[in-house]
Image: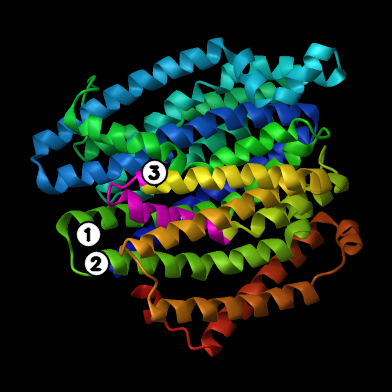
């Protein structure tokens, strides 16, 4: 079992790695084109709104509710019944998405008023910052339709994942990154405001992503004409599971969006600083955390349906081990190398040394919660695989309220970095309570062997952190380096840190068998 999961996880991670690398290239291009300007703030917000809704309609609540039900049909129902469920879910989801998209496009000024409240107030008062509200209201009309295409893409990806074809869905985001890079490089000069080229890149990238997956669905014999099925038993079950899961799985996204709303009241550039630091955080989160959670969900669902003896606990244990093995060094490495990474990747064109220094603060704050973001993905999956979405929503609401309190406490002394730290603290709160509830309900308790494994990983990670802190130059020295020297030095530090971490694992006698099995 765990060997199959390891292969699937590695395949998903490789495809995700390609996507994330291109995502970093895309962000480098955006930083060079827009920096942390007002236009950058506007584009980032108008791009974040449909992506936030995507997490709710597709990758978040929907996928966590849909995959367990689809797995149940696949294992216990006939082929025709399973295909009918796919057709009715796609038709129902498609209609809801179409209506939502039309409302979003038409009511874009109202949407921006809600998510960029600070800009709207400036616009009402006639302040110079009010131009952001006008620009965002127009740009959202271009980026919002991305929701329709990407949510259907995520639906088809969830179907393919259930059939064990993880690579297709993981590779798909590459097309969005390519579309945005091409738009920025070749079409930015065609617009008075270059940010509009990026907005159109998002629009056409969404179309490309959906078209890319259709041949793979056809090859697997899973293409069915969409049908409306609101009252279909399977669709109804998914709806009932999905509604509470809207909070349970998307709390971190809601927190990030709430950060953006508050950041609209801070100085210009705050939204961009949060964005660039969040993008670096998303690299390991998507590469490891989301990848592991994605590959264990079908297996956990299958273990639950078939009541496999010990299978559910073993799969959860494997997920926790892998998250800690990869998440702990990633979090410590991001904290230690925050400023060098930002300088090497983004500090050119419109992105200044001051922008790098400000983004460093929020990146370090976000990094402190990286492991907890990853654990949330895995622990919440333990509930969703059992078709329990009520418990995560209770925990999610508490975590979201805690985030709001942390935001209000930390925003004044720490500004945008306080918003990032508040999000990390709420992630710790969320992950801790998910585990407590799983243990209390007798669903999962971390094994003594896995606990020892995690302790060894922590010790190896701390040794790596010490090396990175002692070996890297000062901020002034980093700023004075050429781009080539920055990249070379940073690459050397990452390699040295990786060797130190692996050596620490070897000295502490962490074996390959500890990783391959639970």
Task: Please provide percent x and percent y for residue 358.
Answer: 81, 48
The residue to which callout 1 is attached is 303
Q: Any magenta on residue 67?
A: no
Element marked by disc 2: helix
Residue bounds of the magenta highlight? 371-390
Identify which residue, 360 or 208, lies in the foreground.
Answer: 360
Question: What mark, if any, has residue 336 been given in the picture?
Answer: none
Position of 25 with respect to 512 (left or right) is right
Tell me the quadrant of the picture where the N terminus can be found.
bottom left
Mark 2 packing: few (<14 Cα in 10 Å), some, or many (20+)?
some
Identify which residue, 310 or 472, lies in the foreground.
Answer: 310
Tell me the quadrant of the picture where the C terminus can be found.
bottom left
Seen at 81% across and 55% down, the residue is 483
Seen at 52% across and 53% down, the residue is 430
Seen at 81% across and 19% down, the residue is 122
Question: In the picture, residue 334 is in which quadrant?
Answer: bottom right
The residue to which callout 3 is attached is 169
Seen at 71% across and 34% down, the residue is 262
Task: Please provide percent x and percent y for residue 61.
Answer: 40, 39
Q: Main secondary structure of the magenta part?
A: helix
Q: Is residue 276 visible?
A: no
Q: Quick check: marks 1 and 2 in contact, CB under 8 Å?
A: yes
The residue to which callout 2 is attached is 311
Question: In the picture, residue 252 is in which quadrant?
Answer: top right
Task: Give the number of the mark in front: 2 or 3.
Answer: 2
Position of 274 with respect to 173 (left or right) is right
Q: Is residue 48 visible?
A: yes
Q: Any magenta on residue 379?
A: yes
Q: Earlier in the sequence, mark 1 or mark 2?
A: 1
Position of residue 70 relative to residue 485, above or below, is above
Element marked by disc 3: helix
Task: Please provide percent x and percent y for residue 155.
Answer: 34, 35
């Amino acid at each position: 079992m765990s060997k199959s999961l390891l292969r699937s996880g590695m395949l998903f991670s490789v495809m995700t790695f390609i996507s994330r690398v291109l995502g970093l290239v895309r962000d480098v291009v955006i930083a060079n084109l827009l920096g942390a300007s007002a236009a950058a703030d506007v584009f980032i917000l108008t791009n974040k709104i449909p992506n936030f809704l995507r997490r709710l309609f597709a990758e978040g609540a929907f996928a966590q509710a849909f995959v367990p039900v689809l797995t149940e049909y696949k294992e216990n129902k006939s082929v025709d019944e399973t295909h009918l469920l796919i057709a009715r879910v796609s038709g129902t989801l498609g209609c809801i998405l179409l209506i939502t998209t039309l409302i979003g496009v038409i009511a874009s000024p109202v949407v921006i008023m809600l998510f960029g409240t600070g800009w709207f107030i400036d616009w009402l008062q006639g302040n110079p910052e009010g131009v952001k509200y006008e620009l965002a209201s127009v740009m959202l009309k271009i980026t919002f339709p991305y929701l329709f295409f990407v949510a259907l893409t995520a639906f088809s990806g969830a179907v393919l994942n259930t059939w064990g074809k993880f690579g297709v869905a993981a590779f798909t985001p590459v097309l969005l990154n390519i579309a945005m890079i091409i738009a920025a490089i070749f079409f930015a000069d065609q617009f008075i405001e270059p940010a509009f080229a990026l907005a159109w890149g998002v629009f056409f990238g969404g179309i490309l992503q959906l078209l890319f997956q259709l041949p793979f669905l056809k090859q697997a014999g899973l293409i069915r004409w969409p049908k409306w099925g609101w009252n279909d038993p399977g669709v109804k079950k998914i709806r009932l599971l999905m509604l509470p899961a809207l909070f349970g799985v998307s709390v971190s996204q809601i927190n990030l969006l709430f950060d953006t709303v508050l950041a609209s009241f801070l100085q210009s550039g705050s939204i961009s600083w949060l964005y660039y630091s969040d993008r670096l955080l998303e690299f390991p989160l998507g590469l490891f955390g989301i990848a592991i959670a994605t590959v264990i969900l079908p297996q956990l669902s299958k273990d639950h349906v078939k009541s496999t003896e010990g299978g559910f606990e073993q799969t959860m244990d494997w997920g926790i081990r892998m998250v800690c093995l990869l998440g702990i060094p990633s979090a410590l490495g991001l904290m230690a190398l925050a400023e060098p990474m930002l300088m090497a990747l983004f500090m050119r064109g419109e992105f200044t040394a001051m922008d790098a220094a400000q983004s460093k603060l929020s990146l370090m704050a976000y990094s402190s919660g990286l492991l907890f973001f990853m654990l949330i993905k895995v622990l919440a999956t333990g509930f969703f695989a059992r078709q329990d979405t009520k418990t995560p929503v209770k925990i999610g609401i508490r975590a979201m309220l805690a985030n709001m309190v942390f935001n209000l406490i930390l925003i004044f002394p720490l500004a945008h970095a306080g918003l990032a730290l508040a999000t990390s603290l709420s992630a710790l709160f969320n992950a801790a309570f998910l585990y407590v509830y799983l243990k209390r309900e007798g669903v999962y308790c971390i094994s003594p062997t896995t606990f020892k494994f995690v302790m060894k990983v922590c010790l190896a990670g701390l040794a790596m952190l010490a090396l990175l802190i002692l070996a890297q130059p000062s901020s002034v020295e980093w700023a004075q380096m050429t781009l080539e020297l920055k990249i070379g030095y940073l690459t050397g530090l990452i390699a040295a840190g990786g060797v130190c971490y692996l050596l620490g694992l070897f000295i502490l006698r962490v074996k390959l068998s500890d990783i391959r099995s639970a």
